[in-house]
Amino acid sequence: MRDLKRIKGDASFRKFFRKKNKLKNSVIVYAKKEKTKNLLIYDAINKILIKNKVLAPKLLSEKYNRNYIEIQDFGNQRIFDVLRKSNNKFLYFKKIIKILNQIQRIRDKNIKNFKDQKYTIPKYSKKMLLDETNLFCDWYLDKKLSKKNIASFRKRFDKIVKNLILNLKFKNEVFVHRDFHVSNLMLVNKQIGVIDSQDAVIGNKAYDLASLIDDVRLKTSIILKKKIFNFYIKKQNKLSVDKFKNDFEILSILRNLKIIGIFTRLAKRDGKKNYLKLIPHAWYLIRVRINNNRVFKDLKYLLNENFREELHEN
């Protein structure tokens, strides 16, 4: 075990270790026994990406009975770190959009994992989207609301979110990474590699772009956000811009509500209190989008009524 060095993980339940080899380093991905199925999914999704010429970590070996797999090492250079030092962020975002377009052209939905078991990418169902958004209620509400007010808030919130989901215009028909942001993109020999893809679903075309542009970890200007959005639109064929913008804004807000819930959970349950400092920016991103579309009228009223200070901070 002397040749293994722990790699700092993000919000994952998995543990990562860099293994020093004579020729090239590799990464050991370890999961607790009850979570080992995740390793099978991780391998399956990476195989689909690699099959479609997207740079993703290859499986080198597996010890599933010992709860780990060994994958290709993409190094330490996250696009997040590259962008923080770059004077031309848009140049990198253009490259990222090209990769996103490549991902969205994937038509494979089934593949066999290293256990020779068929894996089918699930659909991003309305229920899944609703349950994720409700993480905001599950973990964040008791920060400010009484038990009585929580019950009332949840009832109104649930109805509003269901209505927003019904207002989505695009069908669930493209490969969605579901955590497509610059901390999950790596610079590998001057190419951009994609990691942390195990949560992929077949979903709405606007989701990954919303995840990329309205990234809670990387602060970008409104001007840059618009440039990235317009560059993506320019690369599409026969896309209804108004419908797409509608879905982009809805999914951005739902995602950032989910993130507030997840980051609060990480702090409360797992003791990862460093995530709390990112929550004000998630509120900022919600504010940026909530004023753009009349479909948010009820949500805006509800949040203003209960979280006015958070919504208008900064």
Image (cartoon, rainbow, N blue to C red):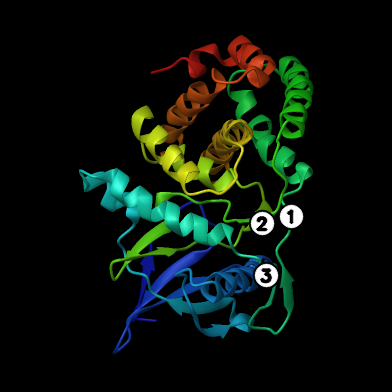
Q: Nearer the viewer, mark 3 or mark 2?
A: 2
What's the amino acid at mark 3?
Lys
Q: Earlier in the sequence, mark 1 or mark 3?
A: 3
Residue at 29%, 49% (x, y): give it: 91
Q: Identify the residue position indicated by label 1 in the image.
A: 123
Judge left or right: residue 207 versus residue 99: right
What's the residue at 38%, 36% (across, down)?
227
Give the SS element for disc 3: helix
Structural distance between the alpha carbons of marks 3 and 2: 16 Å
Q: What residue is rendered at 30% in x and 61% in y?
A: 77
* Type of amino acid at the residue the image marks with label 1: Lys
Can you identify the residue that label 3 sits on?
37
- Amino acid carrying mark 2 in the image: Val
Cα separation between marks 1 and 2: 5 Å
Q: Quadrant of residue 231?
A: top left
Tell me whether circle 1 and circle 2 mark residues in contact (CB < 8 Å): yes
How many marks overall? 3
| x then y, percent, for residue 250 | 62, 31
Q: Quadrant of the C terminus?
A: top left
Badge 2: how crowded within 10 Å, few (<14), some, or many (20+)?
A: many
Q: Give 95 or 256, whichever is nearer the viewer.
A: 95
User: Going by the picture, which residue comes out furthest to the bottom?
Assistant: 22
Q: Which residue is mark 2?
A: 201
Q: Quadrant of residue 146?
A: top right
